[in-house]
Image (cartoon, rainbow, N blue to C red):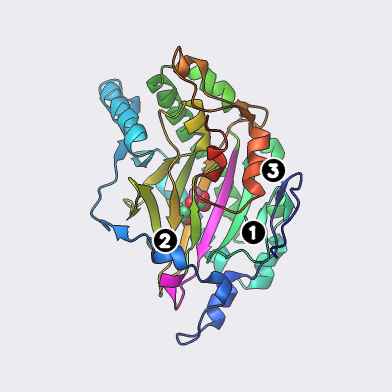
Amino acid sequence: MAKRVVRSQGGYTLSVPNVQNLATSLDKSTHIPERYVRPEANVDPIARTNEIELPVIDLAKLIDPEFSKEEAAKLHRTCQEWSFFQLVNHGVPEELIKGLKANTVEFFDKPLEEKMVYKQDNNGTLQGYGQTFVLSEEQKLDWSDMFYVTTRPVALRNMKFWPTSPSTFRDNMDRYSLELTKVASCLWHYIATNLGVAPEVFEQLFKDHPQGLRFNYYPPCPEADKVIGISPHSDGSGFSILLQINDVQGLQIRKDGEWIAVSALPNALIVNLGDVTEVLSNGIYKSIEHRAMINTQHPRISLVAFHGPDNSVMLRPLPEVVGEGKLNYGSMSYQEFIKVLFNKKLEGKSVIEKLKL
Ligand code: OGA
Ligand code: NI
């Protein structure tokens, strides 16, 4: 009988083994523990690997009066058809990205005991080093470790979880967090305008730029085709901005029912729309389901910045978007939404399904 955890006030997750350590202990001939074997990993074949050119949005064009209208129209089409794009000319300094990438690699390369200084608070904010979304002893596990910190509003930072080594890590995280607020403001401005909503409405919803950084570490696996790095899910954010920390690919998106392996231009930011945008836009834009897969040789590292609304926001389709039309989603406070999200396993678009009318 599956033991299930009673819904807690904050986010809850069971402690499970460190996957990076587990991976190091396996040699090529050993089988992985049953709990990581995912029969569904290869049920849906990957379609069109590397054939698909991901839409590219150019932020410099978006803000240039000469090209803005055309690029904003492209953004609108991309949000409708893909919910997923790579952003170039985003203005985040290259030396900052380079520094943060080096810091992240160095952090995960440290011995387990050193990382465990930042061990996850697994019944509350879920900040720190560990795993998330594990709610029962029987649940299958993802082949990854993660490290999460709340970065904004700045008042909600808990410096206990911010690594002091490498010595530039904290500062680079802080700078990157700030740079992404500029990118986010700009994207929200054009997303609002494209939806026919005053940009101030979005500014209010995303006041103080609530933001969290999730560093994902996907170790290689001798039976890579049997495991999943991160289970299929949509993000509970307004949008998420992903940076590939190393050049190893593994991200896949579900488009028109098929899994598509995606790769990005070097230093492009990968943006994907989350459930919050789906609700606010009354489904004009949809959140996109994605997952990460594993290879036999190389660790893969990614950094995902979640940009959500203020906790006090009531999630519901914006009246300006719905107009006289049909309301497609009910309402729920963002606080409640987050609670539902973090108290169940990751499972496709299951959270937003609850809100559909
Ligand atoms: C996530 C996520 C994908 C990746 O952290 O929400 O979807 O490629 N990560 O790491
Ligand atoms: Ni995600």
Question: In the structure shown, which secondary structural element does the residue marked by tag 2 occupy?
Answer: loop
For label 3, the residue is: 157
Location of residue 13 with respect to 27 vertically, above or below: above
Question: In the structure shown, which secondary structural element does the residue marked by tag 1 occupy?
Answer: loop
> Residue 93: x and y, percent?
42, 43
**How many numbered marks appear?**
3
CB atoms of marks 3 and 1 within 8 Å = no
Left or right of 173 on screen, residue 156: right
Pick the residue in front: 253 or 246: 253
For label 2, the residue is: 246
For the N terminus, the quadrant is bottom right
> Residue 321: x and y, percent?
45, 18
> Residue 65: x and y, percent?
30, 20
Question: In the structure shown, which secondary structural element does the residue marked by tag 3 occupy?
Answer: loop
Left or right of 292 on screen, residue 113: right
Pick the residue in front: 264 or 285: 285
Which span of residues is magenta-colored? 211-226
Location of residue 185 with respect to 235 vertically, above or below: above
Check disc 1 and give the amino acid type. Answer: Val
For label 1, the residue is: 134
| Alpha-carbon span between mark 3 and mark 1 | 24 Å
Residue 333 highlighted magenta (yes or no): no
